[in-house]
Image: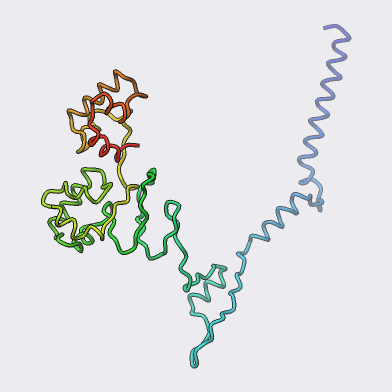
Amino acid sequence: MKQSNRHHFIIHATGIAGIIILLLIRIFWGYLVPNRKVGQDSLLSEEMSNRYAEPPVTIPKKSTVPAREGKSQAAPPEESESLRQGDPVPDRQENPATVLHGKNHTAGDVIPVNTKKKPVPEDYLPVIPGKIELNTADSAELIKLYGIGPYYAVSIIKYREKLGGFAVPEQLLEVNGIDRERLEGFYERVFADTSFITRMDLRTATEDQLAQHLYIGRYLARCIVRYRETAGLDSCTLEHLVRDKVLESAQARKIGWYLY
């Protein structure tokens, strides 16, 4: 190594060593020097810790309802404990509207829970108070309908599971034993929420998945799959299937209720 190169190397090495020593002094300075000055970040962290160390106390609003004579206005033990802990006290006199699928419904409406969210079609029927929803009703609700006993209630539920849900009340006529006279007896008391229908994709569903549907069957499922393989995925629509005589118009309309 030449003398000049060795001199430059010593200078660079000395500079790097000095920088490392300064960094180490800076890091351990807080531990070496007592009564060090607390930085702005430490003060901010301490202030935030003190602020959130205890829950905020909610001051209850003064009631505008006059107290009855002989009755104490003191809050019950449960409510007093809730106020001390900072929990908000619900207003029992209010009846807020519940929003479902973009529509407002009162708290008294029946809103199904624990159901998988599905696309809502354009012909969505809102929750109607006083009526029975066919896709969520159990046997105890169905037997309240005219001419529906335990036997027909179970039959409706079994058919609903096989079909994937009801789109219109008229589909109850497909249940064995239910005729038009019986349906007209309770027609005004029922409705079908189509957002609970089990749907499938006509372009990606397998032959077995299509064949399991009551409106398709094995033969028609095989025809749809062969048409899809020949015409292509983009051409496998109900409109094209009707145009090319694979489906009839009535079949396509009923199958369309169960497609994305």
Q: In the picture, which quadrant includes the N terminus?
A: top right
In the drawing, does residue 41 fall left or right of residue 103? right
Task: Compare residues 244 and 214 and report the one nearer the observer.
Answer: 244
Q: Is residue 53 above or below residue 75?
A: above
Point out residue 83 in the picture as x, y percentages from the top left corner: 55, 72
Point out residue 219 in the picture as x, y percentages from the top left corner: 17, 28
Task: Compare residues 63 and 172 and report the one nearer the observer.
Answer: 172
In the drawing, does residue 121 fall left or right of residue 97? left
Residue depicted at x 32% and y 26%: 236
Residue depicted at x 25% and y 39%: 254
Q: Is residue 185 above or below residue 214?
A: below
Residue depicted at x 19% and y 50%: 172
Question: Farthest residue toward the bottom?
Answer: 70
Task: Compare residues 51 and 179 and report the one nearer the observer.
Answer: 179
In the drawing, does residue 178 fall left or right of residue 69? left
Task: Compare residues 85 and 253 and report the one nearer the observer.
Answer: 253
Point out residue 141 in the picture as x, y percentages from the top left corner: 23, 61
Number of dots carrying numbers: 0
Q: Place residue 200 in its image quadrant.
A: top left
Q: How is the image coloured?
A: rainbow
Q: Place residue 229 in its image quadrant.
A: top left
Q: In the picture, which quadrant includes the C terminus?
A: top left
Q: Is residue 176 above or below residue 215?
A: below
Q: Is residue 49 above or below residue 60?
A: above
Question: Farthest residue toward the left?
Answer: 177
